[in-house]
Image: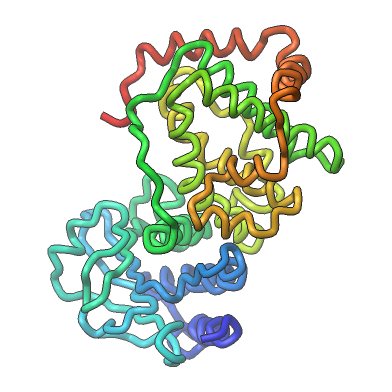
Amino acid sequence: MSAMLRTTALTLLVTGPVFAETGSDQALQEVAALLRNYDKSMEDSLGSWPGFDPAQIPKIVLARDRNRETSHLLVLDHPNAEAFGKVTPLTDTVGETGRAFLVKNPEPSPALEAVENFDFALPLGGAPTFVIVSHCDAPEIEQDCATNPDFTAYLLHEVFHRWQDHHFLPRHDVDQSAYDYSRDAIAAVLLEMAVLHAAVSTQDARERMDLARQFVAVRRDRAARFRHVALDNQQERYEGTARYIEHRIGRTLGTQFDESTFAESLQDSIDIGFVNDEVGFGRFYATGAAILQLAMLLGVEDAREQITKGAAPTEVLAKVALVDGQAHAMLIANARKRFDPQGVLSAKAARFAQSALDEPDIFE
């Protein structure tokens, strides 16, 4: 089904008679809000990654009340919505996708009840189904409630992970518990992030290329000195590209990530008490998205296709931001001269490394 037909179907969904008077019906209010946001994001999400079409993946949004009881389901693009209970159709049927159903008081399902936050492919109703949980009665954070635009971004981020599982060429998995939190390792991370921030911020094409080359040189230097850097490439390829989807749909949704915030998302968010979490995992969302955006800004039109076929974002960037052996040391020296002339990053890294010693292992 074409994007235009699918968008038309979803527009019927949020403007049709079912939603004419939601009144005090909380279930209808929640699904109406979610579907308006889903409708807004559809065109952007379809263009965000070659081959990625959220409507081709059966989905269930499972709404739970404050007692953790299931109150209703929103069934999207599923071939057998009736398997979950009495359905209220929310759209006209258009082909095999673009359909939405509300299921109040769904049939008991141990499989659904076992879902904590989301499940990529739960066998339900004869189809591997993406399931995500909404908590609007008592959300821990705003993103947890389906009425919030950030929930739609979160949903599509995780749906993209489901798509990755079927379409991304696998790479060798890296041990996530082997990360290095020493002073020198963290200092190199901070330098690299500073260079990347400047590269995606500048509007000057020559400066952007020079900074991209500095970034590639610093990353290669890190990889030569610290074996754990393979984890950066792995997580930037998966989490970074999923965050990139959020950036692509964010302007339409009005969420915190959009096409103007790649640099802002890279701002140093490492803080005492969260060093392990941020250095060894959390920052890869922002760095992966920014590296991909930088490659696109430098004219690598097939950057996303290369990543799908197995490349990490930095490997894609390195093909255009060329660094030979003679330039390597000079580019690293230039990066240190510009971004850490007084050793501030090194001093900060020493504090972070000391804090990391007292923090729990985030993967235990």
Instruction: Choose top left, top right, bottom left or bottom right for residue 319.
Output: top right
Q: Position of residue 106 (x, y in %)?
A: 21, 75
Q: Residue at x 74, y 22 (%)?
A: 326
Q: Nearer the viewer, residue 133 or 345?
A: 345
In the image, what residue occupies the spot 49% across and 69% down? 33
Q: Determine whether 131 is above or below 357 in the image.
A: below
Colouring: rainbow
The quadrant holding residue 163 is bottom left
Residue 165 in percent (x, y) is at 37, 58
Q: Going by the image, does 70 lie left or right of 314?
A: left
Residue 15 in view of the camera: no
Please indicate, yes or no, whether residue 120 appears anywhere in the rendered image.
Answer: yes
Which residue is depicted at the point 44% across and 8% down? 354
Q: Position of residue 140 (x, y in %)?
A: 37, 45
**Image vertical order of residue 333 relative to residue 199, above or below:** above
Quadrant (top left/top right/bottom left/bottom right) for the C terminus:
top left
Toward the viewer: 210 or 23? 210
Q: How many marks?
A: 0
Q: Is residue 97 above or below residue 258?
A: below
Q: Answer left or right for 309 relative to 159.
A: right
- Residue occupying image coordinates x 53% and y 59%: 149
Q: Position of residue 220 (x, y in %)?
A: 59, 28
In the image: residue 345, left or right of residue 204: left
* 52 on left or right of 112: right
